[in-house]
Amino acid sequence: MTETNSSAPRTWLRDLRGALVYPLTSNGRLLTTGVATGLTYVVLVLSAFPQFSVQVLTRDPADLAYALPALTREVYLGSGWLGISLVVAYALLTGIAVTNTVALVRHARRAGASTLAGIVPGLLAAGCASCGAGVLGALGFVGAMAALPFEGNLLRIGGIALLATVLGRAGDPRTCSIDPP
Amino acid sequence: MGPEDTITRRRALLAGGGTVAFGGTVAFFASRSGSDAQAYVPDTVRPSEETTGFGVDLAGRPIAGESDAAVDIYYWTDYLCPFCKKFETETLPKIGRDYVDPGKARLLTMSYPNIGEYSTPAAVWSRCVWDHVVDTEPAAFWRWHGAAFAAQSESGQEWANDETFTSITERTKRVSAVDVDACRQDRGDTVRASIDTDVAMAQSARIQGTPGFVLYNRESDAAGQIVGAQPYDNFADALDRVSEA
């Protein structure tokens, strides 16, 4: 079967749907997605003000219960409902990407090194997309997110688009995709 | 593909419910507004023009507390910073009551404009208000300062403009909006240079966000740094440690 350019977006959407529902195929995968989503949200929100987060958690890790709501409120006040919604979407997509990546890596290890090398660029792209917002703060740019276009929401949308692209390209990790000639 | 690899209704409902719960929890914390506590107005204000052991020239910089307090709290802030508002309403009144008013610590306000376009003009307003009231009624500055943070809006930075700050200044007792505006026009460049000095001090102290603090023991030269609107207990511990250092 050959695919035309016009059917490529439809194929990508189908593969994206397959990737998004893959965590629903077992209790373990669903749990992995939930844990990865939660951890990603924590990291994204804490990275909104890394110096504060490090000081608070170093003094008493239990103060995560103070830092997380405080910084959630800060992200909302800094970038609005759109900003905080994008962070939630970002965390959810990353949770799914982590689950699917675990499956892909397991599959690749069984299939051989060349397949593993093939998925590495995708993993790097997803990883960079996830850390983008936090790196600016960690580098010490005061007010970095506020200074970015649309209070950093453009960067978040870019990261989400990159994650969706990676998920759509990989599709359901259980299926083998054959690229058209 | 085994039978366990199928999408069940139970798992779909669990995932949907979990997503809604996750989003709802985030929305709850995002929309939960902070304390409406009264802004802190210090009992005593002793203006000074000395240069402290930490290297801060106090001339023109708002101060609260006794001049012989053992610890200096250098406080970098931005009137557009929501985290600074959280500190001002939830933590500063307690620090004021327990450390500044009893004469244990002195609070020195420094500017670190970093949030929006009006951050620097707001800092200039602040300095000019202090300059105007320092010799007559310095406590008026702290009433103005509290009103400026109270004016912060929950959405965007559009609230921060000349009109809002003029209104705050006009409403603050013992502050002349005309005189403050004259300072902004006539001495704006000098004030902005002083604000640049504050920013340089913050950067040399490795403050990477507002609110930012350096706690400095004036006798022993010991110093500690705190960043962000941390819980009161963290400030109390740090103040106790620096004062004993």
Image (spheres, helix red, strand yellow):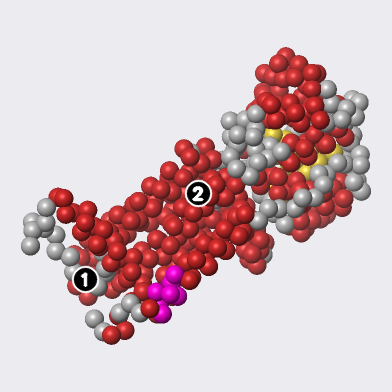
Q: Nearer the viewer, residue B100 or A2?
A: A2
Left or right: B227 in relation to A94: right
Q: Secondary structure beneath disc 1?
A: loop
Q: Which mark is residue A175?
A: 1
Span colored in magenta: B10-16
Mark 2, Cα crowd under 10 Å, few <14 / some 14-19 / many 20+, is many
Amino acid type at mark 2: Gly
Q: Nearer the viewer, residue B95 or A34?
A: A34
Q: Nearer the viewer, residue A143 or B154?
A: B154
Left or right: A34 in relation to A46: left
Q: In this rendering, do the residues under marks 1 and 2 share a single chain?
A: yes
Question: Percent position (x, y) of residue A167?
Answer: 30, 60
Question: Percent position (x, y) of residue A60?
Answer: 67, 64
Q: Quadrant of the N terminus of chain A?
A: bottom left
Q: Chain of mark 2?
A: A
Q: Nearer the viewer, mark 1 or mark 2?
A: 2
Left or right: B233 in relation to A106: right
Determine which residue is flagged by label 2: A83
Mark 1, Cα crowd under 10 Å, few <14 / some 14-19 / many 20+, is few
- When asked about the image quadrant of residue B136, the answer is top right
Majority secondary structure in the magenta region: helix
Determine the residue positioned at 51% across, 41% down: A151
On whether residue A74 falls in the magenta region, the answer is no
Q: Earlier in the sequence, mark 1 or mark 2?
A: 2
Q: Nearer the viewer, residue A92 or A58?
A: A92
Left or right: A61 in relation to A11: right
Q: Secondary structure beneath disc 2?
A: helix
Q: Chain of mark 1?
A: A
Determine the residue positioned at 52% across, 62% down: B23
The answer to whether residue B72 shows anywhere in this view is: no
